[in-house]
Amino acid sequence: MTTAIEPDGFERDYPVLAYLSRYGVGHVQDLRDILEEAAAFRRHHIDPVALDVDRQAMADPCYVADGVLEAAARQGWLTTMIPRLLGGRGLPLGATMMALEELSVGCLGLANLIAAHGLALCTIAGTGDVQRMAEVCRELVLSSANGRPALLSTALTEPSAGTDYEDEDLLRLARLSSEARPAPGGYILGGRKVFISNGSIAETHVVIMPTDRKRPVESLAAFLVRRGTPGLSVGRVERKMGQKACPAAELVFEDCFVPEDRRLVGAPVMRALDLALGATRGAVGVFGAGVARAAFERALAYARTHEHEGRPLIEQQWAQFRLTEMRRNLMVARAAYVEAMLSNELFGLASLLRPNALERAARLLPDAVIDRLPVERVVGSRLVGEAFARAIAHMSEAMIGVSSALGAHGKVTGTDMGMRNCELALDLMGEDGLRHDRGVEKLFRDARLLQIYEGTNQLNRMEVHKRLIAGGVQRV
Amino acid sequence: MSDDSLVRQNAGRFCRQHVEPHLHALDHFPDEPLPSGFLEGIASLELEDLDTNEPEGLAMLAEAVRTMAEAAAAPAAIVLADAVARALPATAGERRLGACPLYADVARPTYRLALRHTKGGVEISGRVPFVVNAPVAAWMVLPAADAEDVDGTFLVHVDADQPGLTVGKPLLTLGMRGCPTADVVLTNAVVRPDRCTPLAPDAFERFFGPAAALVAGTAGASWRAATAYARERVQGGRPIVEHGEMRSMLAEMGADVSVCDMARRALVARDGIDRREAITLFLRARQAAIRVADLGVQVLGGNGYMEDYGQERRLRDARQGGCLLGRPDALRMEIADLI
């Protein structure tokens, strides 16, 4: 006979992880610690400034909350997934995602400012080019320690092709305007990329372009292009509905020469994108859960302090049901992203980056020791590179399919739940929800982008259908 | 030319002159000033002459509101708040711009001033948030409750220069940003007893029609923007209007635009419609309009989220329009009460 154990708050909120912890998975304590740390960061650095940053960026779309970025960099929030051996925090994908939920409760725009470079890192990792990976990771780690992080952006979307780039079948027929023409010693990049998160402030751009527009899938290439490279300029910085704290910019390439050694080598770029998006779409689902929670918490606080027809809202059954629905939506969003996270750690890109014994041992070393190790040379060596590329090549279509589809599923579910909770909060609060100083209208504006970027929710539904339904569910 | 057509023509001319060239400034109020001539342009329409107690007057108001909302909802909200404020017999003769808490269910307001009869008149204190037009109006109508009879709601008519009245800074709002809105505080303000009108429960019911016209205007504009974009934008080598899911979304939008228009027409005609039906129709219209605007953003994808294309503004406007004349959740409960 077993004895029932009362769940604490953590176990109530994360039943899957509680289950795992009881069966001896050791990293759950790490997850608790990272959550508390993220909550403290949010309370001190995000909550107090979120509305002010939003309003400043409304007036000036180029505005960047340098103070928040600096604090996040110094505290290691930009390097959570970078291996400890390279000076990062070496956390598993799951820990990073849960921390992201906490940050996004405070402000989706600031959370994206802190996390948007994740897509670039994942894309580089997805190619298996460990030499470039080690190089950009070290630069990000060292610059973060100084409080001036060398951010990365991913330049994918074009004015006439956004979703096209994220689906092989669409890309074959897309009307692309950009091209990286081969030239002696490298490539000449031409065209425009738009809506690039952190594009105006990134130090390095991961630029995705075909080398032959007539064969876009086969010739798709990825380049590391530094800010200030001749021929690269920042065009307009967009005025967006929300997430204003994270600038979205246009990048203009005019005869921009990039040397051969700045092209990422390894796995085909389409596969690298597949792997990268499989991880980062789940993270957008995390943002959805974060905003679902923020809307729920604000609506609950409102219901506790406001009356309707002489009685507190919280005492009225219809309001209790609204709040219950919001709580349920949050749990649905969480469940979906936890599934995405676990499947990625088992089968997706994160399975290749999962901390091994050496990496766990490295966590015990202080930064000063890590900095002196010649890890960049070792990690970036040909031997390691070949091993990593082999690992990527050996990933089965079924493995990638499941992790990619559950990432897409986490994204669609989390973002739809996030929007739904914003709607419910606005309905409950009436005119009080419409004013900027209450914060709920900002949640609504911020959340709406989640259903669009990292592939529209329509494209992500197609992805789920293609990978999990059309061909029958494959066992992995 | 019919009266409706004339109103539509005048409102359209006003929008072309004072709204469409200044959408950015209007949408960035209060951080940017209102365009010069904007409020004067609204005044020049002389909509205050419409008698909204008469079907013709109400229909013309609805037509003006809908025409404006197709360009931008902010001026439509200004006109609507002014019309609601002057619906009382005591305010009917006002020529200047009026203000009222347009988002409150005035029959069951969440926020009311406290009213007390004294020898010198009626003393009023308290705070009413989110009063539409308050920063630019010459007078306003505010809900109040008698301290000795809290069940009775009054509407108090106060001038903007009333001693004891403080109008807060213009609020930054989700949508309709060019419609100046502020919190209002009265501190021991004394007004004449004839400025306090006992509230008839159905005093504002007729305005569900113009309110539906406002959300129908945003829906119509969203629909046109989305269909035009879907014909132009190519994905996977063919216009997105040819993609199955896109066709389904556009069909949904078209159906919802029809719902808005049917609700608007029925509410404006007011033919045998009681309060329960009025609320029901408005809630359906607002739900449909929000869905159209939301799908419009999705059809436009990344462009739909950017200010340039105007669709994100239409979504914000539709969402805010959906809160007119009462909290949606509270109105739903009122339907239950009326059943």
Image (spheres, rainbow, N blue to C red):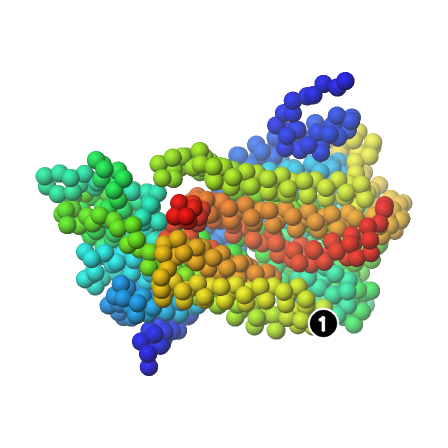
Residue B137 position in % (x across, y down):
26, 57
Q: Considering the numbered disc 1 on the image, is that residue within a helix, a strand or a loop? A: loop
Q: Quadrant of residue A173?
A: bottom right
Q: Relative to B267, say whether A119 is above or below.
A: above
**Where is mark 1, residue-wise?**
B237
Who's the residue at 16% across and 42% down the image? Answer: B122
Who's the residue at 51% across and 41% down the image? Answer: A322
Callout 1: 10 Å neighbours few (<14), some, many (20+)?
Answer: some
A118 or A24: nearer the viewer: A24
The chain letter under disc 1 is B
Residue B321, visible in the rendered structure: no
Residue B146 position in % (x across, y down):
22, 39
Q: Quadrant of residue B306?
A: bottom right
Who's the residue at 27% across and 66% down the image? Answer: B54
Residue B188 position in % (x across, y down):
19, 39
B246 or B316: nearer the viewer: B246
Q: Relative to A124, say whether A182 is above or below.
A: below
Residue A399, visible in the rendered structure: yes
Q: Amino acid at mark 1?
A: Gly
